[in-house]
Image: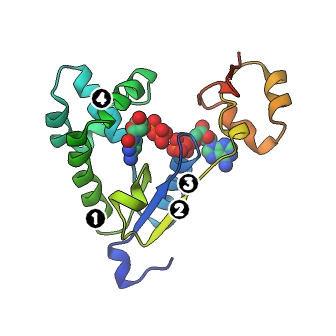
Amino acid sequence: MTNSPDSAQFTVAIDGPAAAGKGTIGRAVADRFGFAHLDTGLLYRAVGAKVAGGMDPAAAARALTPEDLARGDLRSAEAGQAASRVAVLPEVRAALLDFQRRFARRPGGAVLDGRDIGTVICPAAEVKLYVTASPKCGRIGAGRNWAARRRLCPMPRCWPRWWSGTPATWGGRTLR
Ligand SMILES: Nc1ncnc2c1ncn2[C@@H]1O[C@H](COP(=O)(O)OP(=O)(O)O)[C@@H](O)[C@H]1O
Ligand SMILES: Nc1ccn([C@H]2C[C@H](O)[C@@H](COP(=O)(O)OP(=O)(O)O)O2)c(=O)n1
């Protein structure tokens, strides 16, 4: 990717399962090229939080602003559960589709990571990435038993993930 007249509008779409590393890669790409970055999961988390506060889901999604994404409580487990509940509502998805498409075409380039980004949200994205992590690496999580974690995944490159708060389960077992 180089700077060119076309880079005024340039969309990078990053898809993949939860905790695969989409956001980490998305932020790095955005930093490297000076693009704006949107973690689309935050949209659903912000709508979920507003609904938990009493708002109608569709109205919350339609009224969403970038400032709503700066709320400090959106990374909590409660916000994640609230997000999952609103993410299945077609009217919420439709409202957030518009938000995401406007973001994708903003001048200066944009990176979006989440679900259905390269297929439904931005099918015409200039670059599409699909990120995966092996189940072994992706689910070991942030348990406190170092010996158990090292037996399951001895690869040093995975160790930073253990500090991160990703779900502390693997193979149906919860690591403590
Ligand atoms: N290549 C990697 N190796 C090890 N850990 C990683 C890697 N990429 C991301 N992580 C860690 O995995 C966790 C989930 O990454 P994140 O980017 O939030 O995933 P997603 O956006 O797909 O949910 C984070 O704690 C992050 O620091
Ligand atoms: N583009 C998106 C992003 C997230 N969602 C859903 C998936 C989850 O139920 C919630 C919250 O997503 P979350 O922030 O945890 O994103 P990841 O699972 O880390 O990819 O929103 C979605 O349906 N479409």
Q: Residue 4 placed where, x, y %?
A: 40, 83
Question: Which of the two labelled residues, at mark 1 and mark 4, occupies the earlier sequence position?
Answer: 4
Q: Quadrant of residue 80?
A: top left
Label 4 CB-ligand 2 distance < 8 A: yes
Q: Are marks 3 and 1 in contact (CB under 8 Å)?
A: no
Q: CA distance from mark 4 to mark 3?
A: 25 Å
Q: Dot 1 corresponds to which residue?
A: 106
Q: Earlier in the sequence, mark 2 or mark 3?
A: 3
Q: Nearer the viewer, residue 162 or 127?
A: 127
Residue 91 visible in the shown view = yes
Out of 7 and 132, give the one closest to the viewer: 132
Mark drawn on residue 129:
2
Label 1 beta carbon within 8 A of ligand 2: no
Residue bearing mark 3: 25
Contact? badges 2 and 3 (CB < 8 Å): yes
* 17 w.r.t. 88: above or below: below
Mark 4 Cα-neighbour bin, 10 Å: few <14, some 14–19, many ≥20: many
Q: What's the residue at 41%, 63% (across, down)?
A: 35
Q: Which mark is residue 31?
A: none
Q: Which residue is mark 4?
A: 48
4 or 3: mark nearer the eye: 4
Secondary element at image label 1? loop
